[in-house]
Amino acid sequence: MTILFLVALLPVVLGSDCKFMQFDCSDIYNSGETVSGIYSIYPTGDVPVWVYCQMISDGNDEDKGGWTVIQRRMDGSVNFYQPWNQYKRGFGNVESEYWLGKISQAGEHVPADTQQEVHLRVDLEDFEGRKGFALYSYFSVDCECAGYKIYVSGFTDGGAGDSLTSHNNQKFSTFDKDQDVYEDNCARMRLGAFWYAKCLTTNPNANQRLANGYDVLPASG
């Protein structure tokens, strides 16, 4: 099972000399780089963050590539059952599986009242090699003081189905910080952190195939 959460945003201007920094992978893509791989970006200022950039997307959808991978799972080599502070900072290996961390994720740094376009794409590939994606025309993550609440809308189906709209307006929960609306801790029950309401429809940070009998994402077909 391969899972990718990707975002694309507009570039920003930083510093008194008006130098354009590489805010995310779409900025790098627009500069002429079209090869997917590891690049440095500057989502929070002048400190570089290393990320995987997916420059060309599969499928005949409206996106043009240049996606910043904020969550990547492929082979189970990284333990995603992590506490709040690890999800806040980010963890894993940018060369394989990782979670970028909401301090670095660009979604947190784009206020809901701005006109910047923020898109989210979820790419999936199952164990049989079947691929699909889901595209959302709006994506934002609130500040930590608001529980890293997620806002997502504008779904386009690329074969993966819509598993995120029901999580809209939910706070982020980990096993040591329960912020869902369910009576129990969904992150503990489903063995993975996420923007839970009443535990599911999607669980991309859980132990693959092992989240108390539930799959990571809804099955195809």
Image (cartoon, grey):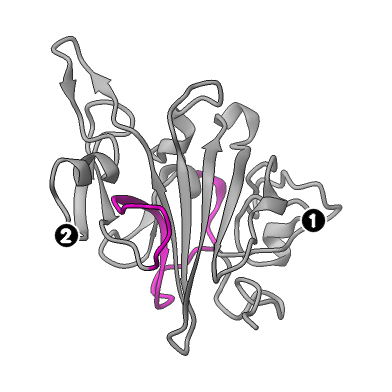
- Disc 1 is placed on an element classified as loop
For label 1, the crowd category at 10 Å Cα-Cα, with few meaning under 14, some 14 to 19 and many 20 or more, is: some
**Residue to which mark 2 is pinned:** 35
Query: Considering depth in this image, is 3 or 194 the residue closer to the camera?
Result: 3
Residue lying furthest right in this view?
183
Q: Residue placed at 64% from the left, 50% from the top?
A: 195
Query: Considering depth in this image, is 58 or 166 the residue closer to the camera?
Result: 58
Amino acid at dot 1:
Lys
For label 2, the crowd category at 10 Å Cα-Cα, with few meaning under 14, some 14 to 19 and many 20 or more, is: few
Q: Does 90 appear above or below 73?
A: above
Location of residue 26 by image quarter = top left
Image quarter where the C terminus lies is bottom right
Disc assigned to residue 178: none
Q: Residue placed at 49% from the left, 48% from the top?
A: 87
Question: Magenta stretch containing residue 69, yes or no?
Answer: yes
- Disc 2 is placed on an element classified as loop
Part of the protein shown in magenta? 59-85
Instruction: Give the Cα separation between the discs numbered 2 and 1.
Output: 40 Å
Residue 6 percent across, percent down from the top left:
41, 53
Along the polypeptide, which appears first: circle 2 or circle 1?
2
Residue 94 percent across, percent down from the top left:
28, 59
Q: Does 76 appear above or below 178?
A: below
Front of the two marks 2 and 1: 2
Q: Main secondary structure of the magenta part?
A: loop
Residue 70 percent across, percent down from the top left:
40, 52
Task: Classify residue 16 as left or right of residue 181.
Answer: left
Question: Magenta stretch containing residue 79, yes or no?
Answer: yes
Residue 28 percent across, percent down from the top left:
20, 43
Amino acid at dot 2:
Val
Q: Does 89 appear above or below 14?
A: below
Disc assigned to residue 198: 1
Query: Considering depth in this image, is 30 or 12 the residue closer to the camera?
Result: 30
